[in-house]
Amino acid sequence: MDVFMVYLFVATATPLFLWNDSRKLALLQTPFIALLWTYVGLFMAYDHLNLFVHAFFITVFIANVFFAHYAAYVVWGRPYLAKRRMEKAKL
């Protein structure tokens, strides 16, 4: 749970970093983050959560990881690759 909490704090800050470059991606990530915080609240409030709840939130967590990597590619990868292509075209 410790690693999950660290990831959750980083994921919560991610839309702030995305806001200037891609507001659409920042807004799309917000429901994932809200669901992950809901899971933390449920996990702390109840002693036993059923398998469906754990499976659902693990799926949301994995989706958020993929989304974060896609957002990083869109914000930093695409401009970098476009810059490299332009530099090669000048040669």
Image (cartoon, helix red, strand yellow):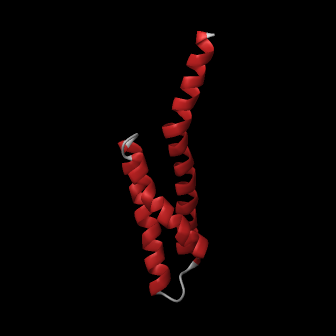
Percent of width and height locating residue 37:
44, 70
Identify the residue at horizontal 54%, vertical 24% (top origin).
82
Q: Residue furthest top?
A: 91
Tell me the quarter of the picture where residue 61 sits: bottom right
Identify the residue at horizontal 51%, vertical 30% (top origin).
79
Total marks in image: 0
Residue 56 appears anywhere in the view: no
Quadrant placement of the N terminus = bottom right
Percent of width and height locating residue 60:
52, 61
Q: Residue furthest bottom?
A: 47
Up/down of 57 relative to 83, above or below: below
In-image side of 46 versus 22 (left or right)? right
Identify the residue at horizontal 52%, vertical 73% (top origin).
53
Tell me the quarter of the picture where residue 87 sits: top right
In-image side of 88 versus 21 (left or right)? right
Up/down of 17 relative to 42, above or below: above
Percent of width and height locating residue 18:
42, 47
Quadrant placement of the C terminus = top right
Up/down of 69 relative to 49, above or below: above
Percent of width and height locating residue 71:
50, 44
Residue 14 appears anywhere in the view: yes
Tell me the quarter of the picture where residue 62 sits: bottom right
Identify the residue at horizontal 52%, vertical 38% (top origin).
76
